[in-house]
Image (cartoon, grey):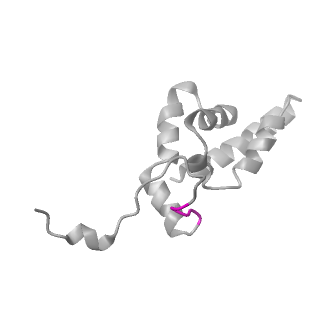
Amino acid sequence: MDEFKVIVVMNEAMLKLLKDKNSNYEENLKIKKILEDETIFFKIDKLEAYKILQNVGVRQENLESVYKKLISPNMFYDLLNKGKLNINDDNLVVKYNKYNPEDLFKKRN
């Protein structure tokens, strides 16, 4: 399951809920714009990410596990392989090393 897409859907649901309740939904409109960038969780610090996750409806006890999924090495390399992420981007807060497939088969001493 793509955790990022779940967060986008949760934000859309929260927007609708807040509109239906005639509550202030300005923050979630900002989040909608922020979530247009699939790489956003690699570009913001943990506290900012937690604020977004809380605003879309992630429960407090699930924040850490959801955040870890969003910034997992698998997500990083998937975005890198799709060309949506540049490993040399100075804006990256969370970054993993790019590996060379040839290094996997080198004999270790």
Q: Is residue 84 above or below residue 75?
A: below
Residue at the top extreme, as displayed: 60
Residue at the bottom extreme, as displayed: 102
Q: Is residue 2 above or below residue 17?
A: below
User: Residue 87 lies in magenta, yes or no?
Assistant: yes
Q: Quadrant of the C terminus?
A: bottom left
Tell me the chief SS of the magenta region: loop
Residue at the left extreme, as displayed: 109
- In the rendered picture of this protein, how many numbered marks are placed on residues? 0
Question: Which sits in the foreground, 93 or 50?
Answer: 93
State the residue at coordinates (71%, 55%). 36
Q: Which x, y percent locates residue 3?
A: 54, 48
Q: Quadrant of residue 25?
A: top right
Question: Which sits in the foreground, 64 or 14?
Answer: 64
Q: Which x, y percent locates residue 103?
A: 26, 69
Left or right placement of residue 60 versus residue 15 in this view = left
State the residue at coordinates (57%, 59%). 89
User: Residue 108 lies in magenta, yes or no?
Assistant: no
Q: Which x, y percent locates residue 44?
A: 61, 43
Q: Is residue 95 above or below residue 59?
A: below
State the residue at coordinates (49%, 55%). 75
Residue at the front extreme, as displayed: 90
The stretch of residues the image draws in magenta is 84-88
Q: Which x, y percent locates residue 77?
A: 46, 61
State the residue at coordinates (56%, 69%). 83
